[in-house]
Image: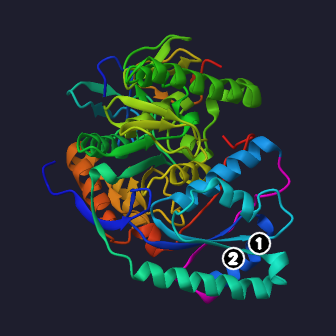
Amino acid sequence: MSKDFSFEGWQRPDGRIGIRNHCLVLATVVCASGVIREVARRLPAVVGVEHAHGCGRPPPDLGLQIKTLAGLVENPNVGGTVLVGLGCEPLSVGLLQSVLPKNGKPLRSVVVQEAGGSRKAADRVEALAREILSGLEEMHCHRGTARDLVVGLECGGSDTFSGITANPAVGKAVDWLVAMGGTAILSETTEMIGALGPLLRRAGDEEVAARLEAMVNRQEARTLEVMGPLAHLVLAPGNIESGLSTIAEKSLGCIAKGGSSPVREVLDYAQRPSRRGLVVMNTPGYDAESITGLAAGGAQAIIFTTGRGTPVGFPVVPVIKVSSTSELYEAMSDDIDVDAGSVLSGTTVAHVGEEILGVLLRAARGERIKAELNEQAVFAIAQTHEAF
Amino acid sequence: MDVRDNVAVVTTDVKVGETVVLDDGTKVKVVEKIPRGGKVALAPIARAEPVLRYGTEIGLATQAMTTGQHVHTHNLGGKG
């Protein structure tokens, strides 16, 4: 890939470059959800994110919530944020502010109980968000290259063709991205069960190998504990209907998304990579929680392969969809950006990989991909008793 | 596909008696109908023998299979 892989983005105080310049209006607790929805109705230019968390959970889960929300605020695609809390919750706006960098991006907050109720709070949030939006409009762009990109990798609704078409094609795109100095995050620990052998052969060093082994074995043990003798069937009904028989078969197809680069680092959920190249993040196989972890880890884009067809996107991160068959692409062309099914009719995996890299570059240059056009946005935080 | 594989994925619905041709030109006669995306056994597989795809074990045969049989959850299980 010798083409010019550069784009105009927005440089953040920490040096990272966003490919979007969103104003985020973020609830720190479930009770602020109504205010978020009201502000998003009044000001469609903001991205409102509400969720079911912020209260009523033990410290380990609260820690994951803080890390995830802080990671979302810090995602380079976010230009500025208004936090909205209720006032009596453990995950208060003050607590979240205390873990975020000082002198960072614009950050304001509103507490519903102090503002005098939800309507007055919404008025206040709207005014602060308008200030942030006008500041974002005045920002200058900076040139970014592959070295500035962190791309999350995800698959959802896999079929038996995912491991032959879409996932290896994404793997090819990832090989080129990594060769250009970029970073890709392979995720979904449940979908590494049964694929530890091939994964360990790609571990960049002994520490990475030890962490990968511990991470996958722990997930396998948990699956056995919960599912018992049916553990190998930790698949969705649609996976089985499409021909996938065991979790190992699904996993071996899943890890093809990582391409052939060595794994440089193993990240906790929502952790930001400290090394460039291919890295692995410990996330559940449950797509909504997994892509949230990837975005909180700083991914500016996500490449998502699908065999059954899934429309999901993420609030501030473009989620590029790649179908494993042409039939799916035709049936859900409103949702799918790239058809990797053409591999079954003779197109090379490398050719589709190039097409995927092309869509990634266009997305980095500002083109809105299908999930953005459809305003598909899901947000879910993995918890201690995370979904499989 | 990997040379060690003892199953392959069919890209169209296949009827009994039809022959599928693998990437390397090998022909396999199918002995039961297999829906698109399903797996066909490329050789006889004994009970408890590993089933290989991507050159790697994807599970163990829960019953003996002959060449051309459909391989799915009814005759393929995990180690658990």
A79, above or below B60, in the image: below
**Mark 2 — on which chain does it sit?**
A
Label pair 1/2, CB-CB below 8 angstroms:
yes
Q: In this orientation, which residue lies closer to the viewer: B68 or B72?
A: B72
Q: Residues within 10 Å of mark 2 (few under 14, many from 20)?
A: many
Q: In this orientation, which residue lies closer to the viewer: A41 or A144?
A: A144
Q: Which residues are magenta?
A: A41-57
Dominant secondary-structure state across the stretch colored magenta: loop
Secondary structure at numbered mark 1: helix
Q: Is residue A108 left or right of residue A199?
A: right
Whether residue A1 is visible: yes
Residue that carries the numbered disc 2 in the rendered image:
A36
Tell me the kind of residue under disc 1: Ala
Residue that carries the numbered disc 1 in the rendered image:
A32
| Image coords of residue A168 (percent x, y) | 33, 40
**Mark 1 — on which chain does it sit?**
A
CA distance separating discs 1 and 2: 7 Å
Tell me the kind of residue under disc 2: Ile
Q: Is residue A66 left or right of residue A278?
A: right
Q: Residue at x 67, y 47 (%)?
A: A382
